[in-house]
Amino acid sequence: MKLTKRALMTGAALAVGLAATGVAAQDDVTKVGFVYVGPVGDGGWTYEHDQARQKVEEHFGDKVETVYVESVPEGPDSERVMTQMALDGADLIFTTSFGYMDPTINVAKKFPDVKFEHATGYKTADNVSVYSARFYEGRAVQGTIAGHMTESNVIGYIGSYPIPEVIRGINAAYIHAKKVNPDVEFKIVWAFTWIDPAKEADAAKVLIEQGADVILQHTDSTAPLAAAQEAGGIIGFGQASDMAEYKPSPRVSSIIDNWAPYYIDRVQAVMDGTWESKNTWDGIAPGMVEIGEITDAVPEEVKAEALALKESIASGEYHPFTGPLKKQDGSDWLAEGETADDGTLAGMNFYVEGIQGEIPQ
């Protein structure tokens, strides 16, 4: 069920009224709310979260009721939406963007009996869990394909915000592109938005004008792929969702965020009374990060190499951040065979050696 903000306000008023008169709704339905940063039709990040919400409904049937509000700006407005969901009787609320972190913590303090799940953040509380995916594992696979397929040796990367999640992705893609093509160069444009198709398209066009013939993105819409298609001769990758409408090219593969198993598990925990605050960070092996079909636009030997890398990451045989690696300033980071620890990755605020430009502050 989609709730508009007005409907949520009405529900909040009703809930307050019921509480004031000592009347409470008694049923066995678990109410689950979702707060989305983009529209459910973005074809990327929010689309996949909403696909997972629908799978929650399919799995639990009439034992669950879900509601969502889309295109909620990060900041004070998100806090208001979460508050209204809680007042309206939500037992569990998923807040699905990094900028919802502090608002989630603030609202959770006011509603200690409501469980909250925040995506991609790091602040927890007794009734707040955090969860994210190891997107950088998928970036390693994309970087391998990109490094092989670029003819100009210029790969463009559209960054959303300069937070550790995005910086990890840039570094992972660069490391693996460089491994297969020592001549590769990355050009990075920061869009400072999660979803804004016009800005995303402009960023892609700027990168193409600068010589990039491969575009990677950490923004949510299909606009960069549309720009690549319009330009011709450019390849790209689906971000967060398969973006299959652009197959077989410019979209030659994708990272698909599979949230459904996690969402179903956490709803079940609320139903069972076993929910506890925890920090989940899963990747390719558990299936939270999926690699979309590598199309026939990619040479067979490159496809085989990319899939072999995927399997070695999934098995634990290989870590995408394995030394020797230096930081951008030339200082040593990881020795030969050493792998990055999760603490460093979670707070990553530096480029690896070879990437040009500065991370915006």
Image (spheres, rainbow, N blue to C red):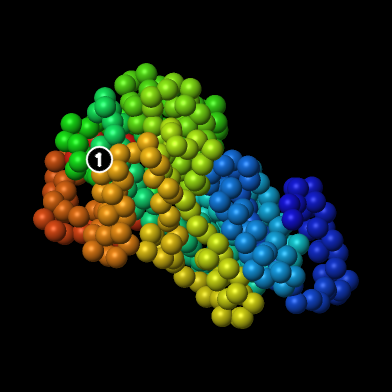
Please tell me whether residue 276 is drawn above or below residue 46 in the rendered image.
below
Secondary structure state at the residue bearing disc 1: helix
Q: Residue furthest top?
A: 209
Q: Is residue 281 visible?
A: no
Near-viewer residue (336 or 310): 310
Near-viewer residue (351 or 150): 150
Residue at 55% in and 33% down: 196
Report whether 138 appears left or right of 3.
left
Report whether 76 appears left or right of 251.
right
Please tell me whether residue 36 is drawn above or below residue 189 in the rendered image.
below
Image quarter hosting the C terminus: top left
Report whether 176 appears left or right of 77.
left
Q: Which residue is mark 1?
A: 177
Residue at 53% in and 44% down: 44
Please tell me whether residue 274 is drawn above or below residue 234 in the rendered image.
below
Position of residue 87 measured from the top left corner of the image (x, y, whole percent): 74, 62
Mark 1, other Cα within 10 Å: few <14 / some 14–19 / many ≥20: many
Position of residue 142 measured from the top left corner of the image (x, y, whole percent): 34, 44
Position of residue 250 measured from the top left corner of the image (x, y, whole percent): 43, 32
Please tell me whether residue 174 is drawn above or below residue 128 in the rendered image.
above
Position of residue 244 measured from the top left corner of the image (x, y, whole percent): 51, 42
Near-viewer residue (45 or 20): 45
Report whether 307 appears left or right of 218.
left
